[in-house]
Image (cartoon, rainbow, N blue to C red):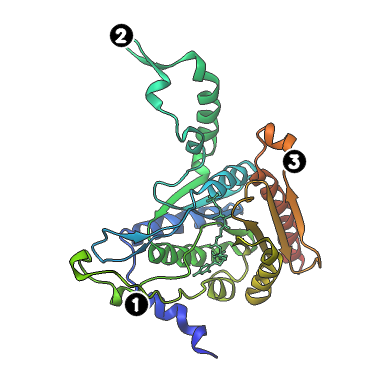
Amino acid sequence: MSEDDFAWEIFFKENPKPVHFEENVALIHEFCQHSAIKKQRVALITSGGTTVPLEQNTVRFIDNFSAGTRGSASAEYFLEAGYQVIFLHRSKSLEPYFRHLSGKNIFDMIEIQPSSVTVDQQHQVELRKLAEKYQLYKCNLLMVSFNSLSDYLWLLQATAQEMHILGPLALLYLAAAVSDFYIPASQMPCHKIQSSSGPLSLSLPLVPKMLAPLVKIWAPNAFIVSFKLETNEKLLETKSKESLQKYHHHVVIGNLLHSRKVYVLLVDRISIHPEEIRLSACELEEGIEIESKIVENLKARHDQYYANHKTG
Ligand code: PMT
């Protein structure tokens, strides 16, 4: 065994649990137990970017681009496909159903009457549709939020372990944009870094890849889907295949930063050539989202995986 095999354990020893950790784990525990008794499928969806704080009393942090579009849209489609959903998301990033109101001002949608407040005519249909869906699915949705990389990894580990009871009914969909670099708690200054000390030089150690223990130890019977993000098209297929070979999970979805809303490729253990999902201009115009097709594809793969487990 190499030193890398234990790097994830050292990470959890050196970085403290997030606040409200026990309360969140209790909620996740209850959600999973309930679903296991009812033999319902549960999808863990991770969404949004992780922050890397530079100070313990955090004034400054390193962040990334992710708004949580992929995760929040996918959560809606998984709910509609009959899954119970644990939505592990970056605080204040996009959320299922509410995302459709992002950038809109609620005060511009209401009319104030002498004794009541109502939605104006123009927004009636849209808001009713959203509210109806939200009401229908909110009991099947557990929202848990994080900010920093360390919070995310603690919650990811705990959720995956709680999902163990679900066996092959569990699906993990790792769409969060997870930092590869961080500052360990022991090396982080307690107080705000002073500019009077001169220019700031940073050396950020590598974050251990958590996919390894996730697949092998935390959720060994779950159907696991990870995303691979690249900016260079030439690397996408190779890197996605390498990830699958390294971690031995079930599907890697490769996407490019600039075309991620219209094109993804899916790599699995069986097919030699990746499967592609590409939205046509027509589909885009009709408002079809690529996540609807990704979830449909994964649901079929998960069906097969579950069937094989039952007979195997
Ligand atoms: O939110 P949007 O704006 O819609 O964007 C969606 C998205 C582009 C963020 C999403 O589709 C996506 O690609 N998410 C994965 C981004 C990412 O972390 O990619 P990566 O190539 O750096 O990592 C590959 C895999 O390793 C990921 O599944 C990640 O969870 C995992 N990882 C990463 C770092 C780490 N320390 N441990 C890990 O296990």
- Asked if labels 1 and 2 touch by Cβ distance under 8 angstroms, the answer is no
The secondary structure type at the circle numbered 2 is loop
Image coordinates for residue 95, horizontal then vertical, percent: 48, 43
Q: Amino acid at mark 2?
A: Pro
**SS category of the residue bearing label 1:** helix
In three-dimensional space, the C-alpha distance between marks 2 and 1, rounded to whole angstroms, equals 58 Å
Q: Which residue is mark 1?
A: 14
Instruction: Please identify the quadrant where the C terminus is shown.
Output: bottom right
Residue at 62% from the left image edge and 41% from the top image edge:
80
Mark before the other along the chain sequence, 3 or 1: 1
Residue 114's mark? 2
Q: Is residue 1 left or right of residue 234?
A: left
What is the spatial separation of the Cα atoms under label 3 and label 1, in whole angstroms? 48 Å
Image spot of residue 207 (x, y percent): 45, 73
Q: Nearer the viewer, mark 3 or mark 1?
A: 3
**Residue 72 — which label?**
none
Front-most of residues 273 and 302: 273
Q: Quadrant of residue 287?
A: top right
Q: Is residue 159 left or right of residue 251?
A: left
Question: Which residue appears at 29% of the width and 77% of the height?
Answer: 186
Above or below 29: residue 69 = above
Q: Where is mark 3, residue-wise?
A: 280
Counting every numbered tag in the picture gives: 3
